[in-house]
Amino acid sequence: MSRHLLSAGDLSRDEAVAILDTAKRMHAIQTREVKKLPPLRGRTVVNLFFEDSTRTRSSFEIAGKWLSADVINVSAKGSSISKGESLRDTVLTVAALGVDALVVRHNASGAVQRIAGWVSCPVINAGDGTHEHPTQALLDAFTLRERLGDLSDRHVVIVGDITHSRVARSNVLLLATLGARVTLVGPPTLMPAGVATWGCTTSWDLDAVLSGKAAGDVDAVMMLRVQRERLGGGSAAGARDLGGQFVPTEREYAIGYGLSPARLDLLPDTAPILHPGPMNRGLEISSIAADSARSMVLDQVQSGVAVRMAVLYRMLAGAEHPVLDEEPA
Amino acid sequence: MSTLLRGAAPLGGAAVDVLLEGGVIADIGRHVDAGGAEVIDGGGLVLLPGLVDLHTHLREPGREDAETIATGSAAAALGGFTAVHAMANTDPVADTAEMVEQVARLGVLAGLVDVRPVGAVSKGLAGERLAEIANMARSSAAVRVFSDDGHCVHDALLMRRALEYLKPFDAVLAQHAQDPRLADHTSCAHEGAVSGRLGLPGWPAVAEESIIARDVMLTEHTGSRLHVCHVSTAGSVELIRWAKSRGIAVTAEVTPHHLMLTCDLLTGYDPVYKVNPPLRPAEDVAALRAALADGTIDAVATDHAPHAAHDKDHAFGDAAFGMLGLQTALGVIAEAMVVTGLLDWAGVADRMSVRPAAIGRLSGHGRPLEVGEPANLTLVDPAGSYLVDAGIHASKSQNTPFAGRTLPAAVVATFLRGRPTVLDAALAEPVPV
């Protein structure tokens, strides 16, 4: 595969399937008592996070450790700009420590692509601003394939704040590569400029989409997290405030775009429900939906480790360890 | 000192000899006697009035690591300019008579181009209180262009009052048209398919157009004079065309980069393409070219904006706005407007010298190429070319979006009141640092 993983759009169908197949074997290891494999022994992976993250960082950390890499977490939040240091200097300083791969999250779109141009080691995008989060798309695809098999011609509905969602952008690209059909649903103020060029169906009417009337039968639905911090709401205005700039209130959002029990009933019994987490229960997803048998939320978390193991393995070990079926070390 | 330009073509017309003496054009004719003058072979070269830039950031005082008045003047001379307007967003801001006089004085010391200070419209560019416009206008710097560039005078009432207040001085308000609610400080990419895919905060065309619409109405109401900085959209062109047809005293400028580059360049997230207003789609570029050709847009202005490398070595959204422009302006205009047949060299002279000088009420520049006129001149090789190399720019900064491109037409010589500032495409004398 390519030297870096910056965008889900960089992956060919063959590459994506190869990662997902490797992840399948990694996934099997997760149920073993002893989970550690040797292929990245002596390698150092740095999680360079310019933005807070618990889930993605822990997932990459566990993935690296189960492959026997030394994983170092560097929290660079508030670095660079606030200290007057350029991003380039910050990154070159970390890279100079002796790093075999950088896993980078940054609050600015395109930052990871920029970083990849400055360092000599492979770089994995763990989320850049409102641009992309390719390993999230891979773990979502993995989860969907576990439930639906091949994704060709499958219809996946993605619901919520598309404008500010790196999860949506990466999923749109990867699902297209894997042959799936995507419908994006959200209020007009949260639909990105130029979304008509994305090759997806778009709608403002969640009921019409979920019932199959608007865009055909639904095979899976992915609820996006409402990111209060990007909508002008959040702590300053009160934890349950949405800022009133993009949507008026939480109540109105939940009524229009939340996965309520009634909407759950519109879906086929077989349709898996995904959410990248953390969930705002009662806002974009009701507890009944979140806790239903169709909810894949915890499967996604588990798949995340397997997929990230697969990505690290294929980028760093590659041909040196062609066989993964060996016994754990 | 006298110089004879042998066989140069004024505005691209028939070749003649032009004698520069005593700071003016002393003679023009088929066979002018050189006498003791230094002779420059003008064969095949086009003679233009010295270029005038309405929009230059020289960064001094405040960011002398990025540019100084001396290094910016050198870049200007090499680019064929004989006068530049130095924007007010320095540190401290040029919002008092003392500040603009200091900028003008440093320009005289550099001695390569006439540096015309632009005064701030509002104190500290804060958009809240009027700056001392009259004092700046009456100062020895005789400011005639006022601008909060970098910031929009967004408060409609302050804009109205500023337009009224500068009327006694025959001055012009140069507006950076950007509604700060529709496009805030994070907005860094044209709002459209590219910004949507890249996840970059959008800067919609309407944020510029709505301000221009308001401002031309305020200009009509106050009977004042408005200049629109760096017009970037087709919609803005339509509004300006409409306002001119109503007889409103509005003029407009376009930058070379908005005539050449599109927002598709942002896909690599390279901040060398980050500029305000942002690069727009190809349809806007076509409309801007047509508007410059038909005169709806009056002038080319560089918005030369030097930045130190460490202010660009960030993520796209965190990097500084702006690109160099002085040394590439003529080549870009040659490629976008002359090679395409949209303007001839007389048209280039009009849009890059005559009209900008008139807008800035700048005497001595943008004059006809006639005997007795000040010898502020630029000699261009229309068949020449210029390989843009950021490293050989006279500017202290290297943030040119044209690096690696070969641009048509090359500035061979520049004369400021008869004295060569550039000869053989190099500075005639070393720059005082």
Image (cartoon, coloured by chain):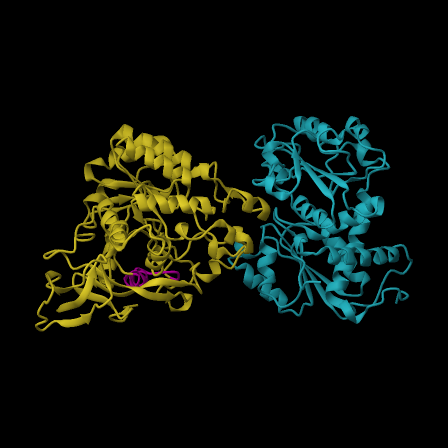
**Foreground residue, B258 or A69?**
B258
Which colour represents chain B? yellow
- Residue at 75% in and 31% down: A210
Magenta span includes B73:
yes
Q: Is residue A193 above or below residue A69?
A: above
Q: Position of residue A262 (x, y in %)?
A: 79, 26
Q: Residue at x 55, y 44 (%)?
A: B193
Could you say which quadrant of the image residue A159 lies in?
top right
Name the quadrant of the C terminus of chain B.
Answer: bottom left
Q: Main secondary structure of the magenta part?
A: helix
Give left or right: position of B70 versus A17. left
Judging by colour alone, the chain drawn in cyan in this rendered image is A
Instruction: Give the total of numbered labels.
Output: 0
Numbered range of the magenta stretch: B65-79
Q: Position of residue B281 (x, y in %)?
A: 47, 46
Indicate the quadrant containing the N terminus of chain B: top left, top right, bottom left or bottom right. Answer: bottom left
Is A131 within the magenta?
no
Query: Could you say which is closer to the camera, residue A179 or residue B303?
Result: A179
As drawn, is A10 to the left or to the right of B364? right
